[in-house]
Image (spheres, grey):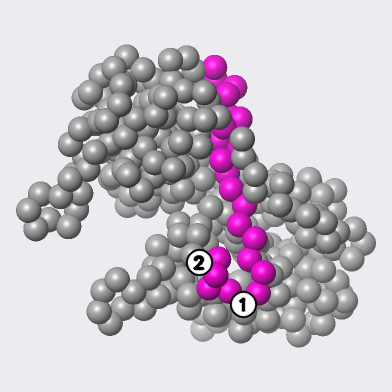
Amino acid sequence: MDRLKVFSCSESAEKFTDEVCDYLKIEKGKINKMKFKNDNNFVQILESVRDKDVFLIQTTQPPVNERIMELLITIDAVRRASAKRITVVIPYYMYSRSDKKDQPRIPVTAKLFANLIEAAGANRVLTCDLHNNAIQAYFNINCDVLTGQSLLQKYFDSKNIDNKVVVATDAGSSKKAYKYAKHFGCPIALVDKRRDGNDDRAIATSVIGEILGKNALIFDDEVDTAGSIMETVDVIKKFGANKVYVGCTHGVLSGPAIERIQNSELEELVMTNTIPLPKEKQIDKITVVSISELFGEAIKRIHEETSIGELFETN
């Protein structure tokens, strides 16, 4: 491990980086980060990384564009300091929803971000539960994608919830829901969504499958404004579900999300710490489970040039 170096790219990534380094039993890399009066960022690596295997961790607490510049500048600093290999660790991939050109004259920002990471000098990327798995192919360098599924399964196993049913929020999420239902050994149900006239937004109207009196579990890659997921919770409760739980890897929780969750009939939202949860968003209905050890193990295996394939497996 003497050639392994792990750095935090921002204040928002400090806690996550500390947890990763604790798992690896190494000291966090020394780095100076500051902002000049003209709003320009400055980074200086305070120890030698020559011929070292360097991992740069950056989380996605707003402002997102500031986090991107911090990451790119740090990559450049480490590259110019003659690191042997630079792996960028992004627990939540920024701009992941801007992954395709589905309207005239719009950018594919997820691809642009991939290009910027490569242009800055990164050799590898480590991330988790992409909104669209096709983003992995946007890179010409190795991109490993972990999943929070096993972590969420372990948490809900520990709660010993009986009479469970896993509910898919729409037809597109049925494959994911089936994997969870297989693990829990419980049935699956599907929320039926229909578009009304020329409205582009699909409205949840009914539930296919038996949920009356059951405890419903919903899983998604992320919860952003919580509008559609709370709509799903309302429909499930309307059709007779007992308690409703939601599990997600990324708690974006932007805009009115916290208010919607607080005022809903949701029993609990369980999410990982890929995105730091600020104090003002910490409410009783939200539980955060740490995924940093999984990232720590992935970093260890990448550094040791051993397989990380089994870290992607779920059961």
Residue numbers of the magenta segment = 136-160
Query: Where does residue 296 sit, x and y in percent of width and height?
Result: 74, 50
Q: Please determine whether, in this image, residue 26 is positioned above or below residue 189.
A: below
* For residue 95, side relative to residue 233 (left or right): right
53 horizontally vs 70: left or right:
right
Q: Quadrant of residue 17?
A: bottom right
The residue sitting at the left extreme is 197
Q: Depth check: give the residue in front, 111 or 76.
A: 111
Q: Quadrant of residue 289?
A: top right
Q: Is residue 197 magenta?
A: no
Asked if residue 126 is positioned above or below residue 166 in the image, the reply reads below
For label 2, count other residues whose C-alpha is less than 10 Å away and answer few (under 14), some (14-19) or many (20+). Answer: some
Which image quarter: residue 169?
top left
Q: Residue at x 25, y 79 (%)?
A: 104
Lower position in the chain sequence, tag 1 or tag 2: 2
The one of 224 and 65 positioned closer to us in this rendering: 224
- SS at mark 1? loop
The residue under label 1 is which amino acid type?
Asn
Q: Amino acid at mark 2?
A: Ile
Q: Is residue 9 above or below residue 40?
A: above
Residue behind mark 2: 135
